[in-house]
Image (tube, helix red, strand yellow):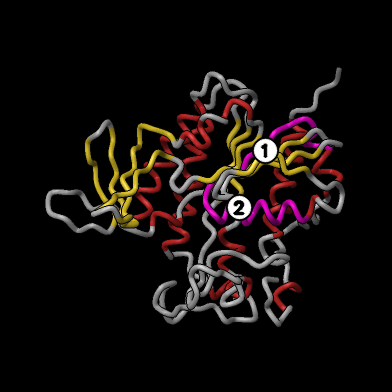
Amino acid sequence: MQGRPDSGFLQWRWKPDGCELPRFDPGTFFEIVRGKTMAFIGDSVARNHVESLLCLLSSEEMPLGIYKDTEDRTRTWYFPHSNFTLMVIWTRFLVLDEERVINGSVTGVFDLHLDKMDKNWANKLPEIDYAILSDAHWFFRKNYLYEKGKNIGCIFCGEPGIKSLDIDSALQMVIKVVLNYINNCKKCRNILTVLRTFSPAHFADGAWDTGGSCNRTHPLGEKEIDLASLEWKIRSIQVEEIKRVRPVARRRKKFEVLDVTKAMLMRPDGHPNSYWGNKWMKGYNDCVHWCMPGPIDVWNDFLIALLRRHAFADFTWS
């Protein structure tokens, strides 16, 4: 709960129309993933998802931490009883990025190379059975996009002679090349690629660096969310790209969507806000990540439902 004094946000749970969503069952999860490797590939929100999953799984089996990088961003856990390996692999943009440096200082401005993958995850792809991808939050800044060394546009730069790109169109370019890369990976085994849709932030009365906060203690109603918002546009292009790659998926490659956007648009009450305990960025509120336990746990309800469907589809009589 990140130290939040209230707990009402724990009492709300997503209910889909026309069906019931079973709660996450760790025993069933381990049966499905026995002997497999699952990697969550993305930024700190991907790690937030993994932390929720670890908490749920630990009631059944405690993992062994077998790898951690120097920045504690990429980690690997092993569950010996189930012979299951779980990874979180840090990447800002999925593709190769280079941060611009001026006079020895980093700028927060990145050059993205669409024809090169981030090796943090690409080098590990052949050993992965389930790849859970997420991307978007790092696109909300000035970024320049390149293809074969040639600039093809930028986000938030407004410079003459450079094509101006919207966040959603730039993100779509990246998702397209990433999914194509996975589909064409010759060394990859029977991999299920799951693209988690955009998890919206809920800053009110300012942005993250201008005093924005998220003080709500109740969810929004379905009629209160904006399905014409940028968040929904991002979600729509993510779904569109999965639909595009499915008909051309190579043998034993499968692509799915973990669609969390609508559920999370309704949960401005579920963020740590000022209770995130960060020692390095005091004075800023966290309305991007999610409290645990909290609304993010439903992502794993969605995930196991998706995995069960695939496990059943892959079952054959011997």
Q: Of residues 70 and 35, which is closer to you in this image?
A: 70
Q: Indicate whether 316 appears above or below 220.
A: above
Say what amino acid the circle numbered 2 marks. Answer: Arg
Q: Secondary structure at mark 2?
A: helix
> Which residue in the structure is indicated by mark 1?
38
140 to the left or right of 132? left
Q: Secondary structure at mark 1?
A: strand
- Quadrant where the N terminus lies? bottom right
Given the current orientation, which residue lies at the most extreme front position?
Answer: 104
Q: Residue at x 86, y 17 (%)?
A: 318
155 to the left or right of 287? left
Q: Nearer the viewer, mark 2 or mark 1?
A: 2
In which quarter of the view is residue 81 placed? top right
Residue 47 tag number: 2
Work out how far the residue at label 2 is from the one at label 1, CA to CA, in angstroms: 13 Å
Q: Position of residue 246 (x, y in %)?
A: 53, 32
Which residues lie in the magenta part?
31-55
Taking the image as drawn, is residue 195 in sight? no
